[in-house]
Structure formats: structure tokens, C-alpha cells
Image: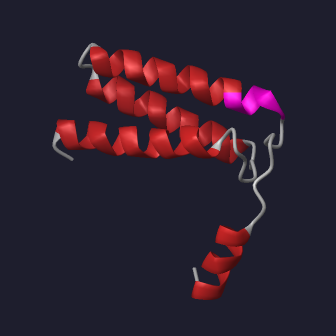
Amino acid sequence: MSTQEQKKQEKAPVSEAPKGGSQVVDEMNALKTKGNEQFKAKNYIKAATAFGDAIKAYEKHNSPRSAAVDPVIAACYTNRALMFHFMGD
């Protein structure tokens, strides 16, 4: 991605509701919660899968940036990376 494209993306307006409405956010939050539960049970592979599924849900709906989605998607990427770290990948 070029620097200009990055700047455009950073300046993209943040909407209140993602494309697909709150259904996307609800699905992502449910999968994130599932991942958190698996993490607490030390099932790192299942946790990473749940966080990955939340990311896929976001991508599947091709959701634009939104105030509701940004923190959830950021947490899912971070948590999935942490699970890979715990698994040694």
C-alpha cells in the first residue's frame, strides 16, 4: 500500500454503524468472547481460531471503518497474535 493510500485510509470517515448493521458487531463480539473463554481455559488453538473467525466475519461483510468495529477488530488481531505467541508460532 502506498503512502498516499495509507493517508486516505487513515482519513477515512469513521461511521457509527458498520455495513450490515449491528449484526456484524454482534457476530464479532460473540466470536471474540468465545476466544476469550478458550484462552482462559488455555485452549490456545481454539482461541486463535475464534479470533480468526471474528476477523473473517469483519472481512466477509466488507465493513467500513466504524466506531463500533475498530476496537473489536483491533482486539481480535492482537489476541490472535498473542495465541500464536503462546503456541510458539
Q: Position of residue 83 (x, y in %)?
A: 29, 36
Q: Position of residue 3 (x, y in %)?
A: 58, 86
Tell me how many marks there are: 0
**Residue at 83% in and 43% down:** 19
**Residue at 75% in and 66% down:** 12
Q: Position of residue 39 (x, y in %)?
A: 31, 22
Q: Residue furthest left?
A: 88
In the picture, measured across the screen, residue 48 lies left or right of residue 1, that is left
- Quarter of the image for residue 21 reads top right
Please name whichever residue, 51 or 65, is drawn nearer the observer in this view of the structure.
65
**Residue at 28% in and 27% down:** 44
Colouring method of the image: secondary structure
Q: Position of residue 2 (x, y in %)?
A: 59, 85
- For the stretch drawn in magenta, the main secondary structure is helix
First to last magenta residue range: 21-25
Magenta segment includes 55 = no
Please name whichever residue, 10 or 46, is drawn nearer the observer in this view of the structure.
10
Does residue 2 lie above or below 9 as drawn?
below
- Quarter of the image for residue 85 reads top left
Does residue 3 lie above or below 21 as drawn?
below
Q: Quadrant of the N terminus?
A: bottom right
**Residue at 49% in and 20% down:** 33
- Quarter of the image for residue 73 reads top right
